[in-house]
Image (cartoon, grey):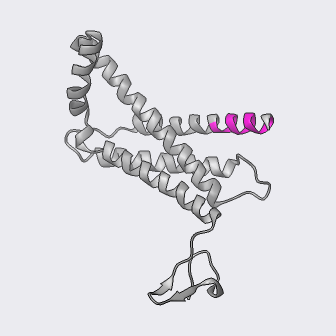
């Protein structure tokens, strides 16, 4: 019988049937990176719902910003736009970083490099795909709008995150 990550000779049988041995540390790390990427995908899917439309977020943010800073409604509309677009940049930048980590664990380099173009490319392509599907989904919701401009913003956030990862990898490597 095959157990993921173990040869058939490593599988132990007991009174309760088959005992699955623990994942190796490499497999455990691989699983953790993909779980993080999938969980963040779920967060993006929730944010894509009608619950977090501009109308609904303004009902939360306006009273808060008005109370904290005395912000009037006409000024709030501009801030609300930038807060929402900032959420895109943060969310899809983090999506790109999480995908980078997952691909780095999945497709290791022989040289044990901290950064590789193929990991970054797969991360950006995955980010662009999720952004496209997210905006396509929003185009079917009456309270949301799906725009190609947001796909471009999200993809640029993914590219920017990969530039930061590259800088981090090269700075950390040089410091070590």
Residue 44 seen from this side = yes
Tell me where residue 171 appears, x and y as whole percent.
74, 33
Label count reads 0
In the displayed structure, does residue 161 sit left or right of residue 91? right
159 up-or-down from 130: above or below: above
Name the residue rendered at 68%, 35% in the picture: 168
In the displayed structure, does residue 70 sit left or right of residue 105? left
Q: Does 31 appear in magenta?
A: no
Q: Main secondary structure of the magenta part?
A: helix
In the displayed structure, does residue 27 sit left or right of residue 110? left
Q: State the extent of the magenta-drawn residues as a range.
A: 165-174
Name the residue rendered at 21%, 33% in the picture: 56
Of residues 164 and 22, the one nearer the viewer is 22
Of residues 167 and 25, the one nearer the viewer is 25
Name the residue rendered at 58%, 62% in the picture: 28
77 up-or-down from 27: above or below: above
Image quarter (top left, top right, bottom left or bottom right) of the C terminus: top right
Tell me where residue 162 appears, x and y as whole percent.
61, 39
Tell me where residue 91 appears, x and y as whole percent.
44, 38
């Amino acid at each position: 019988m095959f157990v993921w990550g173990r040869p058939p000779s490593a599988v132990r049988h007991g009174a309760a049937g088959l005992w699955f041995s623990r994942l190796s540390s490499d497999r455990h790390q691989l699983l953790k990176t993909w779980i993080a990427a999938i969980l963040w995908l779920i967060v993006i899917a929730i944010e894509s719902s009608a619950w977090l439309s501009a109308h609904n977020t303004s009902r939360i943010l306006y009273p808060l910003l008005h109370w904290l800073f005395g912000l009037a409604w006409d000024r709030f509309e501009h801030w609300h736009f930038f807060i929402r677009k900032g959420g895109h940049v943060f969310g899809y930048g983090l999506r790109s970083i999480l995908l980078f980590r997952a691909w780095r664990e999945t497709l290791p380099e022989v040289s044990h490099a901290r950064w590789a173009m193929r990991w970054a490319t797969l991360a950006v392509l995955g980010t662009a795909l999720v952004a496209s599907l997210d905006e396509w989904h929003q185009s079917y919701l009456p309270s949301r709008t799906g725009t190609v401009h947001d796909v471009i913003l999200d993809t640029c956030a993914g590219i920017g995150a990969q530039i930061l990862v590259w800088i981090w990898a090269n700075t950390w490597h040089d410091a070590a």
